[in-house]
């Protein structure tokens, strides 16, 4: 068990969200599911919390009610090796959600994600400062990040 676990507060979709996230990321799993008993909270059998793991990180999904909503102040970053991987996560996470700028999106539960090609930070810290500025300028015009376009901007093509 990791020392610090991220708790994600949902209105009533904790089980659905954990199921969605664990099917999206290979090697992920759902752990303990706590359901309401006779003493509550909520109706008997309703999911209260779900422990799940994605990419080796433990999360806790909580059905806490409508009091709190996700904001972009907290996001999950997915570092992708290929454009195919960027496209796969982008398409799955925006289905029912919404696209934003610069590789950011909100999924159908309102949780913010950043889908980032691993090469992008390398371009920004590369040996050509002008190329880094061109790559940054290109990224600022994108919603879903495009590896070939970022590389081309860096190269000055």
Image: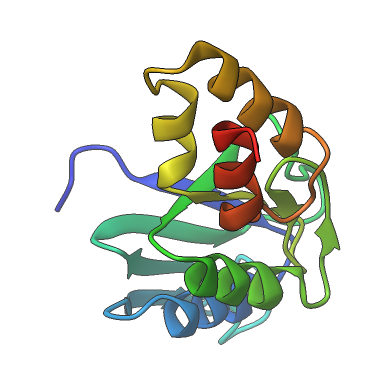
In the shown orientation, is residue 75 left or right of residue 98?
Answer: left
Q: Which residue is more in the foreground, 54 or 61?
A: 54
Residue 113 higher or lower than 75, as above or below:
below
Is residue 126 visible from the viewing direction of this image? Answer: yes
Q: Which residue is more in the foreground, 54 or 39?
A: 54
Q: Residue furthest top?
A: 129
Q: Residue furthest front?
A: 157
Q: Which residue is more in the foreground, 137 or 93?
A: 137
Residue 48, image quadrant: bottom right
In the shown orientation, is residue 141 left or right of residue 109?
Answer: right
How many marks the image carries: the answer is 0
Q: Residue at x 74, y 53 (%)?
A: 105
Residue 146, image quadrant: bottom right
What percent of the width, then of the height, locates residue 125? 41, 20
Q: How is the image coloured?
A: rainbow
Is residue 40 visible from the viewing direction of this image? Answer: no
Q: Residue at x 40, y 47 (%)?
A: 118
Q: Residue furthest left?
A: 1
Q: Residue at x 34, y 80 (%)?
A: 26
Q: Which residue is more in the foreground, 132 or 49?
A: 132
Residue 154 higher or lower than 64, as above or below:
above
What percent of the width, then of the height, locates residue 109? 74, 64
* The C terminus, quarter of image: top right
Q: Residue at x 83, y 57 (%)?
A: 99
What percent of the width, then of the height, locates residue 72? 73, 36
Residue 95, image quadrant: bottom right
């Amino acid at each position: 068990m990791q020392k610090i676990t991220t708790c994600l507060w949902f209105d009533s979709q904790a089980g659905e969200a954990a199921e969605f996230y664990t099917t999206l990321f290979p090697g992920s799993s759902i752990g303990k599911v706590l359901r309401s008993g006779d003493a509550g909270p909520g109706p008997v059998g309703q999911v209260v919390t779900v422990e799940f793991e994605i990419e080796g990180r433990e999360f806790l999904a909580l059905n806490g009610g409508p009091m709190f909503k996700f904001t972009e102040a907290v996001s999950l970053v997915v570092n992708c090796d290929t454009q195919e991987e960027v496209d796969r996560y982008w398409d799955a996470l925006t289905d029912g959600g919404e696209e934003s700028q610069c590789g950011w999106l909100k999924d159908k539960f309102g949780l913010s994600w950043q889908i980032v090609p691993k090469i992008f930070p390398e371009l920004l810290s590369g040996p050509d400062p002008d190329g880094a500025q061109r790559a940054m300028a290109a990224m600022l015009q994108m919603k879903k990040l495009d590896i070939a376009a970022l590389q081309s901007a860096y190269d000055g093509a």
